[in-house]
Amino acid sequence: MRILVVEDEKKTASFIRKALQAEGFAVDVCGNGDDALAATTTTTFDALVLDIMLPGRDGLSVLSQLRERKNATPVLLLSARGEVNERVAGLNAGADDYLPKPFIIAELVARVRALVRRGGDNKSIVLRLADLALDTISHEVKRGHAKIELTVREYRLLEFLLRNTGRICGRMSIIEKVWDYDFDPGTNLVDVYVKRLREKIDDGFESKLLHTVRGIGYVLKENE
Ligand code: CA
């Protein structure tokens, strides 16, 4: 398992490298975006830890270049806390996960492990259920031949449900994974978004895919 860490702050890079090596990962480190892109053309990595703030080509540019080249290596983006726009831009550019700085190193390691695991059992970049397809690189969503336009949040919600096809997803786990909140905002946020998503993916189609499990949450599956 080989990880590429892209971070120009030497102390942070070395801290991440040591922690990942202690977990048994082989780790390469690049201090700028161009070196990182060059490294990904010669070496296949199992995941990238990519800082947004880099000298020259920044992390978001590295990420979009990577995806443009149809490289689906899972990417964990690092960014200064509270930069919501960057996070949205990162997810739009094809990041798989996002961690604000300062982070706890154990959390970074856990997230890298999760990305590698996910990459390992799901090499496909297109997630499918019946005639519904979500391309995790281009972010294109289709039902049959019909293209479906989703907002960023609706897309993340659908991707999360698709990665858990057949499993009941509770409201709290949806809030954690799709909104990154670790508290219950105490609103019907999830229900509102599920309703909108359902209108887009199920309305007008005979077989419904998004089902409510009363009092618990939601599940994406074929047939009720
Ligand atoms: Ca940096």
Image: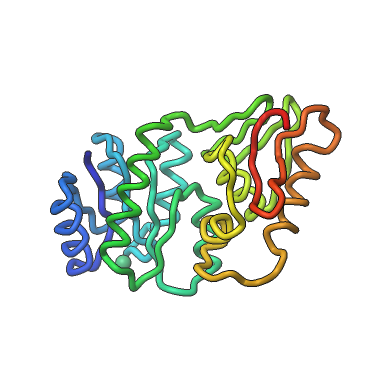
Relative depth, front residue between 115 and 89: 115
- Looking at the picture, does residue 170 appear above or below residue 211? below
Residue at the image point whose x is 75% and y is 58% from the top: 192
Q: Is residue 116 left or right of residue 207?
A: left
Q: Residue furthest right?
A: 204
Colour scheme of the picture: rainbow
Q: Is residue 142 above or below residue 194?
A: above
Pick whichever, 5 or 163, lies toward us. 163
Quarter in which the N terminus is drawn: top left
Q: Is residue 219 above or below residue 189?
A: above
Q: Is residue 178 left or right of residue 192?
A: left
Identified at 63% across, 44% down, the residue is 158
Residue 61: give x, y in percent of width and height: 44, 53
Q: Residue furthest front?
A: 215
For the C terminus, the quadrant is top right
| Marker count (numbered) | 0
- Residue placed at 46% from the left, 50% from the top? 95
Write down which quadrant ligand 1 falls in: bottom left
| Residue situated in front as seen by the camera: 168 or 147 | 168
Rendered residue at 71%/41% (across/down): 211
**Percent from the top left, x then y, of residue 195?**
77, 51
- Give the image quarter of residue 120: top left
